[in-house]
Image: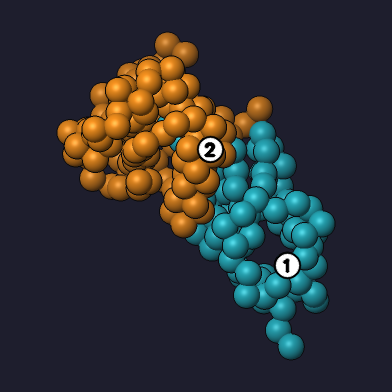
Amino acid sequence: MSNRISVQLFGITREIVGSSALTLDLPQPGQVGELLNNLKERYPALNGLRSLLVAVNGEYAEADQPLHPNDEIALIPPVSGG
Amino acid sequence: MVSITTDPIDMNAAYRYVSTDAAGAITFFFGTVRDSTNERAVERLEYEAYDRMALTKMQEIADEACQRWDVRKYAIIHRKGNLAIGDMAVLIAVATPHRADAFDACRYIIDTLKQQVPIWKKEIFEDGQVWVDAHP
């Protein structure tokens, strides 16, 4: 049973990680907050951002939202459109 | 209609799209690329979008504007890719029977877009690059 989570990266998070997508093999998919903590440990520069949100299937997600292997997951650094 | 494009934004096409006999007012907002930030000369901007989510959010904002005001037609167009000084980065157009609704809905759409829609811009200076608002 694979718990492979893939995460899309944009803007400054893409530059921090050095790739436009990340794949993580986790013991369990877990929750949004756990994924964020995991990524902030691997890439400490993420801690310096003004905010860092996670979108799941195109919607902003709360920290306690559970993740599933087929979810479309993206890191959302502070937006600056317009 | 909402859209994200790498092509230059066509304001005349947007005007034709929102024109309707029911409108007594049409407002436009154009966001354009400014030549400086904090007195530092900007060379160009690079815009990046999470297209799927950005389009969903733009549509939600448009739907909310239509709930709050008597909007008969609207266009929300954001450009991405490399933009030069003076280029149009975003266009909002709103057609309503009366002008107050057109001003208020247009202001709401651009303000909310800037807060919620996953689009990012990087300012390219002569001596460096900055993702706008990324750091405290």
Of residues B36 and B62, the one nearer the viewer is B62
Identify which residue is drawn at 67% across, 34% down: A50
Of residues B28 and B24, the one nearer the viewer is B24
Which labelled disc corresponds to residue B81? Answer: none
Q: CA distance from mark 2 to mark 1?
A: 32 Å
Q: Is residue B51 left or right of residue A3?
A: left
Which chain contains the residue that carries disc 1?
A
Q: Residue furthest front?
A: B22
Q: Is residue B19 left or right of residue B40?
A: left
Q: In the picture shown, does residue B116 fall above or below A28?
A: above
Q: Which residue is mark 1?
A: A67
Shown in orange, the chain is: B
Rendered location of residue A8, percent (x, y): 55, 60
Q: Nearer the viewer, mark 2 or mark 1?
A: 2
Quadrant assignment, res B70: top left
Q: In the picture shown, does residue A45 fall above or below B42?
A: below
Instruction: Name the element at disc 2.
Output: helix
Instruction: Name the element at disc 1.
Output: loop
Of residues A8 and B71, the one nearer the viewer is B71
Q: Which residue type does callout 2 highlight?
A: Gln
Q: In the picture shown, does residue B81 fall above or below B23?
A: below
Which chain contains the residue that carries disc 2?
B
Q: Which residue is mark 2?
A: B67
Q: Which residue type does callout 1 highlight?
A: Leu
Identify which residue is drawn at 26% across, 29% down: B87
Q: Is residue B120 left or right of residue B32?
A: right
Rendered location of residue B84, percent (x, y): 26, 31
On whether disc 2 and disc 1 are found on a single subunit, the reply is no
Residue count near mark 2 (Cα–Cα under 10 Å), binned few <14, some 14–19, many ≥20: few
Chain A color in figure? cyan
Identify which residue is drawn at 35% across, 46% down: B1
Rendered location of residue A34, percent (x, y): 80, 59
